[in-house]
Image (cartoon, helix red, strand yellow):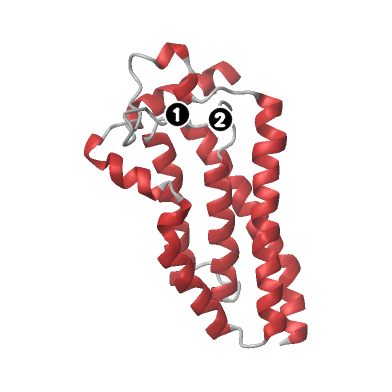
Amino acid sequence: MLELINGFDESLFQAINGAWPACDTLMWWASKPLAWTPLYIILIIAIAKKYSQWSNRLLILISVVVCIGLNDTLSSHIVKPATQRLRPSHRVEFEESIHLYQQDDGSFYKGGKDSFFSGHASNHMGLAVLLGAFLCGGVASCRWMWGLVVWAILIGYSRVHLGVHFPGDVLCGWIVGAIIGGGIFKIVKPRLQLIS
C-alpha cells in the first residue's frame, strides 16, 4: 500500500514539476517568505484594527510565534530526520527529468536533503488558519480565511514546481499546519474573550 501511495506521489510530482517553466520566477518568489512582507504588514494592520487592546495583540503575537515554532520543530527537527525521505531534487532517478530553478549565479536550487513533510507548507497553512480565524472571529467562511488559505496553497504548490518537494510532502504539511493553527486558535479564543 505504501509503495502504491509513493508511486502515485512520484507520478503526480512529475506531472506538476516544471509544468509551466514560464512561472519559474513567480514560483521562486512565492516560495520566499520575504517576498510576502507587504501581506504581513496588511495582516498586522488588520489585526491591530480588530483587536485594540494590547493584551489581545500580545496574545495573538505569542500564538503566531508558537504556531511557527511548533510547525518548524515538528517538520525540520522531528519528522524529517525520522523519515529521511530524500527531496526529489536529491534523488538520482530524477536527475534527467526534474525541473529545477536556476539561480542568478547559475546554480540550481535544490533545498535541504530531507523532504517529508514540507515546512513551508505547514508553516504557511498554520499561519493562514490561525490568522484567518483571528480575523474572522473563528468563522471559516470569511474572505480573510479563504484568501489566506489560497496564499498557503500557492506557497505549497511552488515547492513542487521548484522540484524540492513531492505533492504528498506538501499535502501533509498543509494538514499538520491547519491542525496546529486551528488548535492554537481554539486554545487562545476563550482567553481573548475574557480580556476583551
Q: Amino acid at mark 2?
A: Ser
- The mark found on residue 4 in the picture is none
Residue 15 appears at what percent x and percent y?
33, 27
Query: Closer to the camera, 28 or 158?
Result: 28
Question: Residue drawn at (70%, 62%), measured in percent from left and top?
Answer: 184
Closest to the observer: 58 or 152? 58
- Please indicate, yes or no, whether residue 34 appears anywhere in the rendered image: yes
Q: How many numbered discs sit on the rendered protein? A: 2
Residue count near mark 1 (Cα–Cα under 10 Å), binned few <14, some 14–19, many ≥20:
some
Please identify the quadrant where the N terminus is shown: top right
* Residue ID for mark 2: 115
Residue 132, quarter of the rendered image:
bottom right
Instruction: Give the vertical position of 17 relative to 157 (above or below).
Output: above
Q: Residue at x 58, y 69 (%)?
A: 133
Task: Locate residue 70, reporting x and y percent.
Answer: 70, 50
Q: Say which residue label 1 marks.
A: 110
First in sequence: mark 2 vs mark 1:
1
Lateral position of residue 51 relative to residue 107, left or right: right
Residue shown at the point (35%, 22%) measured from the top left: 98
Q: Is disc 1 placed on a helix, strand or loop?
A: loop
Is residue 142 visible in the rendered structure shown here?
no
Quadrant of the drawing holding the C terminus: bottom right
Choose mark 2 or mark 1, whichever is in front: 1
Q: Is residue 49 above or below residue 36?
A: below
Please state which of residues 88 and 38 is positioned toward the viewer in this rendering: 38
Query: Residue lying farthest front?
Result: 105
The Cα–Cα distance between marks 2 and 1, rounded to whole angstroms, is 11 Å
Dot 2: what SS? loop
Q: Quadrant of residue 160?
A: top left
| Label 2 packing within 10 angstroms: few (<14), some (14-19), many (20+) | many
